[in-house]
Amino acid sequence: MTDARPTPDVVVEPDAGRLARSVASALVARLAAAQAVHGTASVVLTGGGIGTAVLVEAARLAAEPEAAVVDWTQVDVWWGDERWVPGDDPERNEKGARDALLDAVGVPTDRVHAIPASDAGHAEPEDAAAAYAAELAAAGDGGVPRIDVLMLGVGPEGHVASIFPDSPAITDDRTVFAVRDCPKPPPTRVSLGFATINAAEEVWLLVSGEGKAEAVARGLSGTESPVDLPAAGVHGTRATRWLLDAAAASQLQR
């Protein structure tokens, strides 16, 4: 049986700053294109250094009249994962995204689909995961809603969202689930699963730094199992893009 997955695209920029600017520009263009077709656009955000830097650059573009091609009031924003911490904790991906982009561009409250925080009325992360799964299903008429771009960071050991190597999350077929005992603090999180990630039209893996070069090379080798390297198990329905700086790409064969 032939694998219908699209062959990954690989883009390498000289450094992290150039990578953030390039991805921000591509994101604005992709969301604008989605709005031209559908009237709305949807994006799944990631945290981390490069993920936040992309949002800062997107906010800068939004402030330039000639680049203001996205109607941010018509963008639905979701997250790939979230730490199980209070809503005002700086560890929250939501807080970082609001500070970097969402508040500046005026995304309406009802279009910001934040994963519930630990102080948002859910006793356990499993309850928060179930609530987020229900929100996704409501937006998607019972399934996963259209996701134009889903951005992911990649850890040095190859984790994506909060799916780590050798984790039960790898074989969990739910759209959203709680993850406990993560090897990276904080240990308790809520994450999208492969069922949601791989339903996105485009999946963009954003990777910066030499410390992640081995994971990048393994992820693009085509030989890795998601059990050992979760990044190897993600793909978009239309496109999968590895967006790298030179340091992250340093172990790729040219």
Image (cartoon, rainbow, N blue to C red):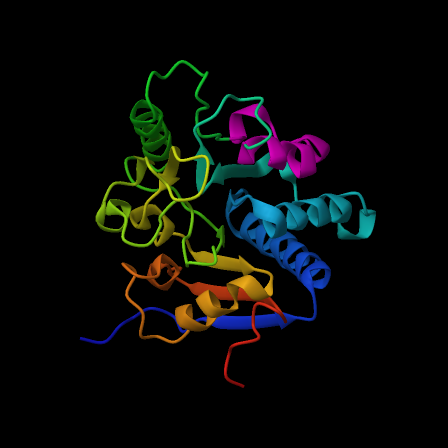
- Is 188 placed above or below 240 here? above
| Residue located 30% across and 36% down the image | 177
Classify residue 179 by image quadrant: top left
Q: How many marks?
A: 0
Residue located farthest toward the left when viewing the structure as drawn: 1
Using the image, determine if residue 200 lies above or below residue 143: below
Q: Is residue 229 above or below residue 45?
A: below
Q: Is residue 17 left or right of residue 194?
A: right
Quadrant in the picture for residue 94:
top right
Which one is in front, 211 or 246? 211
Q: Nearer the viewer, residue 184 or 71?
A: 184
Name the spot of residue 241 as percent of width and height, x first: 49, 65
Residue lying at 29% horizontally and 48% vertically, measured from the top left: 195
Q: In the rendering, at what x and y percent does residue 132 appear?
A: 37, 30
Q: Quadrant of residue 62?
A: top right
Q: Point out the residue furthest to the bottom here.
A: 254
196 vs 223, nearest the viewer: 223
> In percent of the image, x 50 and y 21: which residue is there?
86
- At which x and y percent is residue 9? 49, 72
Residue 110 included in the magenta stretch of the image = yes
**Residue located at (53% from left, 30% from top):** 111
Q: Residue furthest top?
A: 121
What residue range appears in magenta?
92-112
Q: Which image quarter holds the N terminus? A: bottom left
**One can see residue 68 in this view:** no
Confirm whether residue 142 shows in the render. Answer: yes
Q: Is residue 49 left or right of residue 140?
A: right
